[in-house]
């Protein structure tokens, strides 16, 4: 029998105020993503099994189960190995046993293996999967949540830094690099060296000391050990964070999983030409419909990466009919040789981004995948890979998206008569309004008066010069633009000086931008969860879980 969920919402969660902002009001959203969020069913040309609401997923369970033919026990044995190694909870191990039952489906999500768990949206993805698995199970569709750690990716610089809000209310960026790292090797295999101790020390020094700081230190120092692998450390910390939630972790570098995934990789090699042709056609369709192709696919594209003898993960490119070459070591292959290697040593290959979802859903009975906006765009492109390999296309849902708004930052917004969306203009663009309204209206009036008088005098001069010589008038127009530009630059400097004089307000504005819209991006895209675990303790994860509304397709503000 499946254990009862340990994901009980605390009473405090019910007292949180939640508001929602449409993604259409957020900057940087692609048209494809916005259209998908608005009406996914209308895009079934690209998402054949899209659902209009979460409640429709239950109807696809039988299709998923009918197309799932892999040995469940072998998959679950591999999961037991992975989750035992990373210290996953008893609830997670119980869920693995539950996955052995032939009617159980999987709710899947995943993310790159970021330093100290990376940005907040890693946490939001995992909680989204947990929430849906609980909901489906309650509705009579047995489901478990799985988190795929992208340990096979090779862009180490992208995952080896993390940002937090420090005790000084400013953004602190912590960067780690390993002297033991082989360039372009799989990030999960990077061995941590002693400098990880310095990174942890710098991270902790940036945090304010609270009643939870010692627990944070223990979590980091027991997860990110010198000589451990980067992927192992990432999973250990996630396992600590999600102890009560029964989240199952997947490491695609696991030897047993690699062997189990071998047949679908062999199929992808055999059908690589068809896959590339379909992807190129799909890319053209997306562009002709006014969308974008997330991944550039050219006629030499190959859906799998090769791992060299030196451990480098490198692209394979087609160089002739049935002929291929890896980029890093220049090794030549025929189609038959690639198939033979994949059958005998599947660990030498890892799927590219267009094939990875198909491999995931070959290994697991996936009823849906939770991704971000970019991943949703990937699915619109790579659904043809599913179809080429005769696999059912998995529905993709957008993960929950949050900004945590602490009370002091909400007070700043209220005091300045600003909304959350006003922050998207950027601090430099908001400054004039804030100065004119709250700090120094006299300075604002002075500059406006000066500009008005200069323009009036220049207008008089323009009338005179136009009558005298039109070329002189044109020259004046050019110089007028320069004058106005320099006055504007001086206005900005004066405003900044006024803001510095008002130290309290300056600090409040800077702190609000750092917390809610750091470096011109959504909070969830850079700030690490430890910022809030250090302030609020493990209850913070409960609050997030209780704030999830799978039927809300907007960006949700959690007002603490």
Image (cartoon, grey):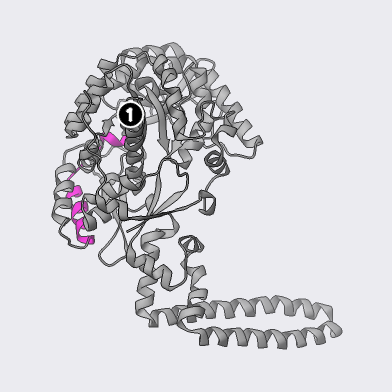
- Residue 115 against residue 314 in the figure, above or below: below
Q: Which residue is tagged 1?
A: 137
Residue 176 part of the magenta segment: no
In this picture, residue 458 sits left or right of residue 466: left
Please say whether residue 320 is visible from this viewpoint: no
Q: Quadrant of the N terminus?
A: top left
For label 1, the crowd category at 10 Å Cα-Cα, with few meaning under 14, some 14 to 19 and many 20 or more, is some
Residue 192 lies, in percent from the top left, at 21, 41
Please tell me which residue is depicted at 53% across the width and 29% down the height of the picture.
Answer: 47
Quarter of the image holding residue 466? Answer: bottom right
In this picture, residue 409 sits left or right of residue 275: left
Residue 35 lies, in percent from the top left, at 57, 41
Q: Nearer the viewer, residue 414 or 281?
A: 414
Q: Which residues are magenta?
A: 186-207
Q: Nearer the viewer, residue 349 or 553?
A: 553
- Residue 13 against residue 502 in the figure, above or below: above
- Residue 169 against residue 10 in the figure, above or below: below
């Amino acid at each position: 029998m499946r254990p009862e969920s340990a994901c009980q919402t605390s009473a405090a969660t019910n007292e949180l105020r939640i508001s929602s902002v449409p993604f259409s009001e957020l900057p940087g959203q692609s048209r494809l993503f916005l259209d998908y969020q608005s009406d996914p069913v209308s895009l079934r040309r690209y998402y054949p099994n899209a659902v209009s609401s979460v409640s429709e997923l239950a109807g696809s369970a039988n299709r998923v189960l009918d197309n799932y033919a892999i040995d469940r026990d072998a998959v679950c044995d591999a999961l037991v190995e992975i989750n035992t190694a990373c210290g996953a909870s008893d609830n997670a191990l119980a869920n693995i046993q539950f996955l052995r039952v032939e009617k159980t489906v999987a709710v899947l999500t995943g993310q790159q293996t970021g330093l100290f768990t990376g940005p907040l949206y890693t946490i939001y993805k995992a909680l989204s999967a947990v929430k849906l698995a609980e909901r489906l199970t309650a509705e009579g569709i047995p489901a478990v949540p799985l988190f795929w750690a992208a340990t096979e990716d090779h862009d180490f610089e992208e995952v080896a830094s993390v940002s937090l809000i420090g005790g000084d209310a400013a953004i602190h960026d912590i960067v780690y690099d390993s002297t033991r790292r082989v360039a372009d090797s799989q990030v999960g295999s990077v061995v941590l060296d002693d400098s990880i101790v310095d990174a942890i020390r710098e991270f902790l020094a940036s945090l304010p000391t609270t009643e939870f700081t010692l627990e944070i230190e223990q979590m980091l120092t027991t997860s990110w050990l010198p000589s451990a692998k980067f992927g192992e450390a990432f999973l250990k910390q996630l396992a600590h964070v999600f102890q009560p939630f029964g989240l199952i972790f997947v490491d695609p570098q696991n030897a047993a999983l690699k062997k189990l995934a071998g047949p679908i990789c062999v199929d992808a090699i055999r059908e690589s030409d068809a896959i590339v042709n379909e992807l190129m056609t799909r890319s053209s369709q997306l562009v002709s419909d006014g969308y974008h192709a997330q991944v550039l696919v050219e006629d030499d594209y190959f859906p799998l990466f090769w791992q060299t003898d030196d451990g480098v993960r490198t692209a394979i490119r087609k160089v002739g009919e049935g002929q291929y070459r890896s980029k890093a070591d220049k090794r030549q292959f025929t189609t038959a040789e690639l198939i033979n290697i994949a059958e005998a040593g599947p660990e030498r290959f890892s799927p590219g981004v267009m094939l990875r979802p198909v491999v995931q859903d070959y290994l697991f009975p996936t009823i849906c995948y939770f991704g971000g906006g970019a991943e949703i765009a990937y699915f619109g492109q790579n659904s043809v890979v599913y179809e080429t390999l005769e696999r059912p296309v998995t529905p993709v849902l957008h993960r929950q998206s949050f900004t945590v708004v602490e009370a002091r930052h909400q007070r700043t917004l209220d005091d300045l008569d600003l909304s959350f969306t006003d922050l998207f203009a950027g601090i430099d663009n908001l400054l004039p309004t804030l100065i004119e309204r709250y700090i120094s209206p006299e300075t604002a009036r002075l500059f406006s008066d000066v500009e008005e008088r200069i323009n009036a005098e220049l207008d008089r001069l323009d009338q005179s010069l136009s009558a005298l010589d039109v070329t002189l008038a044109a020259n004046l127009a050019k110089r007028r633009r320069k004058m106005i530009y320099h006055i504007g630059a001086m206005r900005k400097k004066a405003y900044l000086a006024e803001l510095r004089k008002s130290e309290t307000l300056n600090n409040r504005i800077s702190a609000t931008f750092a917390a809610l819209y750091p470096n011109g991006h959504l909070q969830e895209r850079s700030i690490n969860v430890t910022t809030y675990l250090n302030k609020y303790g493990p209850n913070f994860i409960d609050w997030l879980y209780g704030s999830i509304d799978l039927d809300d397709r907007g960006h949700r503000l959690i007002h603490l």
